[in-house]
Image (tube, grey):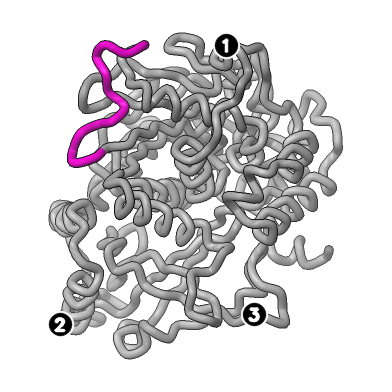
């Protein structure tokens, strides 16, 4: 049916960018939640061309879930949206399955109709338990509560930007088909910064970047990465919850754009052996009253003692949080020192094998970069564990902590053991959520060969949390 008969909302990319940047500014300025809610509900009621609102939330492993609500129903029932939590891996047990979805109206996005369909807008949801409290397994809610508490108590704004690498492969559903094909096929054999205009990789990057720009990402640069057919699209810093939301949207956009082009965007950390894997370098800083607390022109590497304490706390429990940062069997292929792997528990301004790097910065951009993060990690859990550790953790008594010869685990079994034994993880996640997460990771690991070997095994892909299919998991 032609769209003019449906009369569904379709906005051009300039209009989308203007609307999304305005919403982003409201969020940045901490406009009261009730004010934004009233504004969004009025907009939905007045805009007759919107048919549905897509509400998004993430499970414990970080997989994004989408529910489309009829707009008229949502306007009447937004405060009573329920879903079956027992159907979401890592959420409630069957006997306590009912959960609710609240709406975070500040995380409202207008989306390109040529990518997501006409007549739709998107918003992030907040998972709420039966008692009306934030659900402990919803790491977005945990992160948001922590960020709000830090701002209220200390005036801190936690900032983050993530450099998310991925691969572009030929064919749709290349990951699901991997057990049959045993190979991922590149769309481009080039390398770092090299891709001819109009080739499949460049076309994909250009299209995804345009969608991001329209959705208010405020792009900075994009380019092919070191490995063949690998990409990275960078965008501006944001407050920590918005930054985590944008990671989820980034991966969703890339997957959707690739699918529309008959291709697959993959965020497996190491889908192909013998070339660089994909990371999610996580740049973080803390500001107060508009001042970057990590900057000190006279400090070591021009960052403050406050920032160095933040780094030291992360290095102290680097092994404890490794499973959160690298949650899949495949992620431990990437922690290979032959491919610039950040597997050393130390900090450095120059050594890219360090878990934490201190980039060149200034008063505005001074930050620390946690490099040992895989792109398949739950972004909310990653940023929560990094900031919670950096601000509230304890500093080890190890001499020369920043230069000590210590290494992250080289396999998921060691990472699981250290995660389970960690008192710090229990403190920040709680015993129940900690065990649920560990069990999910253990189950995936046990379905894969214990030794990684020199080739990517089908089970690494087949049982990967971001690409599994329901019929397969239901057999276990």
Span shown in magenta: 288-300
Closest to the observer, 71 or 432: 432
Query: Which residue is depicted at the point 36% across and 72% down?
Result: 103
- Which of the marked residues, 2 or 1, is nearer the chain's N terminus? 2
In the visual, does 145 lie left or right of 71?
right
Relative to 18, does residue 197 appear above or below in the rendering?
above
Observer able to see residue 268? yes
Viewer-side residue, 402 vs 125: 402
Q: What number is the disc on residue 367?
A: none
Q: Earlier in the sequence, mark 3 or mark 1?
A: 3
Write down the residue under mark 2.
Answer: 46
Please provide percent x and percent y for residue 49: 21, 78
Indicate which disc, 3 or 2, sits on the residue closer to the N terminus.
2
In the rendered view, does 10 fall on the left or right side of 141?
left
Query: Is residue 113 at least partly visible in the picture?
Result: no
Write the residue at 45% across / 54% down: 143
Residue at mark 1: 400
Q: Quadrant of residue 344?
A: top right
Would residue 197 appear left or right of 267 to someone viewing this image? left
The residue tagged with tag 2: helix, strand or loop?
helix
Name the quadrant of the C terminus. Answer: bottom right
Crowd tier of the residue under label 3, counting other residues whose Cα lies within 10 Å: few below 14, some 14–19, many 20 or above = some
* Pair 2/1: label in front: 1
Relative to the observer, which residue lies in front, 313 or 355?
A: 313
Verify whether residue 125 appears in magenta. Answer: no
Q: Judging from the image, what secondary structure is the residue with disc 3 in?
A: loop
Residue 303 lies, with reference to residue 211, above or below; the image says: above
- Distance between the Cα atoms at labels 3 and 2? 35 Å
Q: Read off the residue under disc 3.
A: 97
């Amino acid at each position: 049916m032609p769209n003019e008969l449906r009369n569904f909302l379709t906005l051009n990319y300039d209009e989308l960018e203007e609307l999304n940047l305005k919403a982003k500014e409201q969020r940045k300025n901490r406009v009261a939640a009730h004010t934004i809610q009233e504004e969004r509900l009025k907009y939905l009621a007045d805009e007759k061309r919107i048919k549905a609102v897509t509400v998004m939330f993430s499970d414990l492993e970080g997989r994004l879930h989408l529910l489309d609500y009829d707009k008229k129903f949502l306007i009447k029932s937004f405060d009573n949206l329920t879903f079956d939590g027992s159907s979401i891996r890592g959420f409630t047990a069957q006997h306590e399955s009912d959960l609710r979805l609240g709406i975070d109206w500040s995380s409202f996005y207008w989306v390109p109709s040529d990518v997501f369909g006409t007549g739709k807008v998107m918003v992030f949801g907040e998972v709420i338990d039966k008692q009306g409290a934030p659900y402990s397994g919803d790491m977005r809610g945990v992160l948001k509560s922590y960020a709000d508490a830090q701002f209220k108590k200390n005036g801190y704004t936690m900032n983050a930007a993530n450099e998310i690498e991925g691969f572009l492969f030929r064919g749709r559903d290349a990951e699901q088909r991997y057990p049959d094909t045993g190979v991922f096929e590149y769309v481009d054999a080039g390398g770092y910064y090299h891709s001819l205009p109009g080739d499949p990789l460049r076309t994909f990057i250009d299209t995804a970047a345009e969608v991001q720009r329209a959705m208010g990402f405020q792009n900075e640069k994009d380019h092919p990465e070191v490995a063949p057919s690998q990409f990275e699209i960078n965008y501006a810093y944001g407050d920590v919850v918005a930054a985590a939301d944008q990671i989820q949207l980034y991966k969703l956009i890339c997957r959707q754009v690739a699918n529309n082009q008959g291709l697959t965007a993959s965020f497996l950390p190491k889908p192909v052996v013998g070339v660089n894997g994909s990371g999610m370098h996580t740049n973080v800083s803390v500001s107060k009253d508009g001042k970057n607390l990590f900057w000190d022109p006279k400090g070591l590497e021009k960052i403050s003692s406050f920032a160095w304490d933040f780094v030291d706390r992360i290095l102290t429990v680097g092994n404890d949080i490794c499973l959160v940062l690298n949650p899949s069997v495949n992620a431990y292929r990437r922690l290979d020192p032959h491919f610039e792997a950040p597997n050393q528990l130390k900090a450095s301004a120059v050594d890219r094998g360090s878990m934490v790097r201190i980039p060149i910065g200034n008063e505005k951009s001074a930050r620390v970069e946690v490099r040992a993060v895989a792109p398949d990690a739950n972004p909310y859990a990653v940023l929560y564990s990094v900031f919670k550790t950096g601000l509230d953790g304890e500093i080890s008594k190890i001499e020369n902590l920043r230069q000590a010869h210590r290494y992250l685990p080289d396999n998921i079994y060691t990472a699981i053991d250290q995660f389970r034994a960690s008192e710090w993880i229990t403190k920040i996640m709680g015993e129940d959520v900690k065990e649920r997460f560990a069990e999910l990771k253990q189950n995936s690991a046990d379905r894969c060969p214990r030794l990684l070997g020199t080739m990517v095994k089908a089970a690494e892909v087949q049982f990967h949390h971001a690409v599994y299919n329901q019929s397969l998991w239901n057999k276990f």
